[in-house]
Image: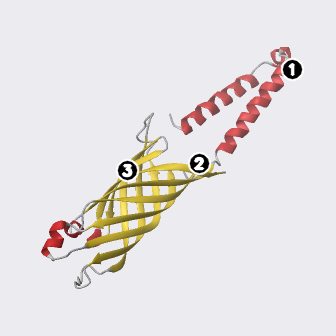
Amino acid sequence: MTYKTIIFITAFLIIGESSSFSQFPENKLKLLDKPIAEKKLTFADSLSKGLKRSKSISAVFLSVGGGISVPLSPFKTSSDVTFGILGRIEFSSYGIFPFVVGGEITYFSYAGADEFKTINLLTNFKTTMLSYGLNIEYSLAKILRSSFTMPFLAVDVKYNNIKREYDESRNFTDLPKEESKISVGAGFGFTLFIFDFYTKYNYMKNNSHIGVYTKTKIPVIRF
């Protein structure tokens, strides 16, 4: 049961109680103990105001985590699968639900594939990517209902600073030692308590890759 369902049920009970109370004949209403009647009305009014305030609930979260990145062709020709880290600042609000927006930064370091180094007579080859950009998630809680998890779709656009390390005596025209590229990612995942698990395809021309990630959310600001 999502928090929206809980709010709806609570509001329904409050409205139902208030409407039934207002339909009492006047002579029966007078029979009620006046202080008790006033307390009921005050309690219902305070809950109603609380519900109105809840619609403006917003929060900023700090997310940290990591994952596995699997290079795709032609990127996999030169680089192996690797682990990396990520950090994200997310904004979530009742007003923009089911969307969650955030800024993300990731860092991955890919070791050179053995076959690539052997063919090109290299003693060392490494590719590092420092990426940062905008991420948007869309909750599927209304479509795929679950009591334990909340599925979501995710898209992002990132600026990637790519650096490569290899023997000084070698020069690859298609693999410069430093370059910058824009990437676009799309994926699917689910939230389990304070943890997110998701997989995402990242398109970046000759450096496309698929990632499997996990992160945890920590609320830092609520308003």
Crowd band around label 1 with a 10 angstrom C-alpha radius: few (<14), some (14–19), many (20+): few
Judging by the rendered image, the residue that carries numbered circle 1 is: 34
> Which residue is at 67% across, 39% downward?
51
Give 5 or 192, whichever is nearer the viewer: 192
Percent x, y of residue 108: 36, 64
Q: Whole-percent x and y of residue 53? A: 69, 44
Q: Is residue 215 left or right of residue 3?
A: left
Residue on which disc 2 sits: 94
What is the image's colouring?
A: secondary structure
> Disc 2, disc 3: CB below 8 Å?
no
Mark 1 vs mark 3, CA separation in Å: 57 Å
- Determine the CA span between mark 2 and mark 3: 23 Å
Near mark 3 (Cα within 10 A), the count class, few <14, some 14-19 or many ≥20, is: some
Which three-letter amino acid code belongs to the residue tagged 2? Tyr
**Residue drawn 43% across and 36% down?**
146
Secondary element at tag 1: helix
Q: Counting other residues with Cα less than 10 Å from the Cα at mark 2, is it few (<14), some (14-19), or many (20 or more)?
A: some
Kind of residue sitting beneath label 3:
Tyr
Q: Secondary structure at mark 3?
A: strand
Is 29 on the left-hand or right-hand side of 44? right
Image label count: 3
Q: Earlier in the sequence, mark 2 or mark 3?
A: 2
| Furthest residue in direction front, as rendered | 123
Task: First in sequence, mark 1 or 3: give its number.
Answer: 1
Pair 2/3: label in front: 3
- Residue topped by disc 3: 198
Going by the numbered disc 1, the residue's amino acid type is Lys
The percent coordinates of residue 195 (x first, y second) are: 45, 45
